[in-house]
Amino acid sequence: MAADLHCHTKLSDGSVGIEDLIVIAQKSGINTIAITDHDCLAGTVRGQVIGKRYGITVIPGVEISAFDNEAGKRVHIISYLAEKPDRLEGICKRTSVARKRAGQIMMLKVAARFPVSNDFIVGHASGSTNLFKQHIMHALMDAGYTNKIYGELYDALFSPESSTNLLAPIKYPSVEEVINEIHGAGGIAVLAHPYKYNNIPELEKYIEMGLDGVEVWHPSATDENIEEISKLCKKHKLLLTGGSDFHGIYGRNTVTLGTCVTPDEHLDKLMGYKAKKKRAARRAEKEAAAKAAE
């Protein structure tokens, strides 16, 4: 059973709506997906309802943005199967507000540099909970200033190394805060695409914070990367997941749904993880009580 556990929709920075995503999954022979929009839980319930209609299992998820101040790196943590997802609304909303402010600043700068209106740019973010760089680039594509989302113009406007960039800073929560919030919501914390942001050197630190798993199969990971991270996960008894990080036309590379998937064995472990942890906790409590009674 194919399971793509990393998919984005129009609610964040994907180009495809929830129902369309589910139809693509069905026609691609993918039986299980996770909708993991950036700092956005809005598609979780709707995704599960529509998924049932098409015979697709939709696992509730959200990709939460974090920052490791010590390492100076961005970090993305995916929450899966949160029992109380409303407890994640606060941390997601804070980032969403910061992202919205940054998006407005970048939009104004773009509108001052190119003959496009704010409304024209905002129109390309219709249906999204925020204005992302991809929406701005899509507007510039339609205005004829480029023929692709990513390329020279994107780098000039949004690369930190570019002297002409229009970036506005966004303050993200710490990795530890994100992991704690996910666990507080009864969810499973998985490090997304560790090779994309070079998060491997900090992995053991995140494990100490309570990280539950790592996204092993991802378009950014080579065969050698997969072998390396699989060994680390086995050593630390972490969950292994996989997903395409599907964004439709808003993806940096051409990626189809199901490009990377979670093998059945590891999907089963993910689905049974919380029950296993609860059993282990109960055993530990009984053992502690028995020792105290001696």
Image (cartoon, helix red, strand yellow):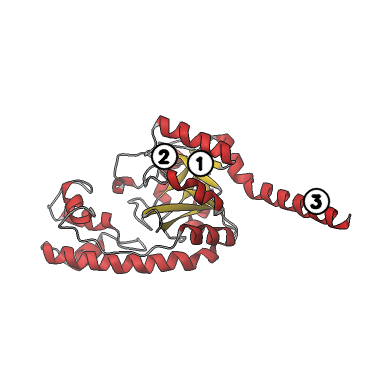
Mark whose residue sits in front, 1 or 3: 3
Residue 77 against residue 237 in the figure, above or below: below
Q: Circle 2 — which element?
A: loop
> How far apart are labels 2 and 1 at the CA level?
9 Å
Identify the residue under disc 1. Answer: 241
Give the class, few, some or many, for how many residues have Cα within 10 Å of label 1's Cα (few <14, many ≥20): many
Residue 59 in view of the camera: no
How far from the left and from the top, in percent, is residue 82?
Answer: 57, 57
Residue 13 against residue 196 in the figure, above or below: below
Three-letter amino acid code at disc 1? Answer: Thr
Which residue is found at the position 80% from the left and 51% from the top? 287
Which residue is found at the position 55% from the left and 51% from the top? 208
Q: Circle 3 — which element?
A: helix
Give the class, few, some or many, for how many residues have Cα within 10 Å of label 3's Cα (few <14, many ≥20): few
Three-letter amino acid code at disc 3? Answer: Glu
Identify the residue under disc 2. Answer: 218
- In front: 79, or 123? 79
Mark whose residue sits in front, 2 or 3: 3
Say whether residue 225 is left or right of residue 103.
right
> How far apart are labels 1 and 3 at the CA level?
32 Å
Give the class, few, some or many, for how many residues have Cα within 10 Å of label 2's Cα (few <14, many ≥20): many
Identify the residue under disc 3. Answer: 287
- In front: 275, or 30? 275
Which residue is found at the position 15% from the left and 56% from the top? 163
Quarter of the rendering occupied by the C terminus: bottom right
Q: Residue 214 carries which label?
A: none
Circle nearer the N terminus (2, 1): 2
Say whether residue 259 is left or right of residue 60.
left
Quarter of the rendering occupied by the N terminus: top right
Which residue is found at the position 40% from the left and 65% from the top? 95
